[in-house]
Image (cartoon, grey):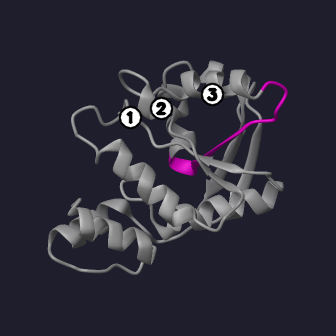
Amino acid sequence: FDPVHLGHIHLARLAKNALQLDEVRFLPCRISPHKTDSRPTAGEDRSEMLRLATAGMPWAVVDDYELHQSGPSFSYETAEAIAGRFPGCRLFWIMGGDQWESLPDWRHPERLAGCVEFIVLARGESIQARDGYRLHVVQGQHPASATDIREAIFKGQTSHPWLDEQVAAWIFKKRIY
């Protein structure tokens, strides 16, 4: 969510509707274990951008849990903590097909799988089930790219079609990129 864009919201809504989820929690990470060589935008700014992007969506919850942890944000730790906070709830983890493919390389994916069911947003590709993993495939895509948005803003673009207007205003007010 650096920055959150309309693609994130669109795909979250697809997952919510496909599985009739009560809510979708947006979890900005403190430090991605896959991107330890780069510095993300401040967590407070990413959280505020999420709040602005999800305003008026009662099903969307911004959860700052990972921002208050030390070190990289590992999904299995977050899922275990959420399961402890919401005992007896059916939990899902939304991810793209590319993340599903790399999941075996994540730290303790089996522990994550023990806590959640996976919703994999496929972009037309065939998603293969894995033993011990509860999988729901939802077809959906969006052309938005956080990298492209950051680059466009860095180059002086003052708006972007993939940004919520309130998020764009926040980015320019705070001079984030």
Query: Label 2 neighbourhood size at 10 Å, few (<14), some (14-19), many (20+)?
Result: many
Which element is circle 1 on? loop
Q: State the CA–CA distance, disc 1 to disc 2.
A: 6 Å
* In the foreground, 100 or 112: 112
- Residue ID at (54%, 33%): 103
Q: Earlier in the sequence, mark 3 or mark 2?
A: 2
Note whether residue 163 is visible: no
Q: Say what amino acid the circle numbered 3 marks.
A: Ala
Mark 3 — residue? 79
Q: Is residue 89 magenta?
A: yes
* In the foreground, 129 or 92: 92
Q: Say what amino acid the circle numbered 1 marks.
A: Arg
Q: Earlier in the sequence, mark 1 or mark 3?
A: 1
Q: Is residue 103 magenta?
A: no
Mark 2 — residue? 66
**Residue stretch in magenta:** 87-98
Q: Position of residue 53 (x, y in %)?
A: 51, 65
Q: State the CA–CA distance, disc 1 to disc 3.
A: 15 Å
- Residue ID at (42%, 59%): 49
Q: Say what amino acid the circle numbered 2 marks.
A: Glu
Query: Label 1 neighbourhood size at 10 Å, few (<14), some (14-19), many (20+)?
Result: many
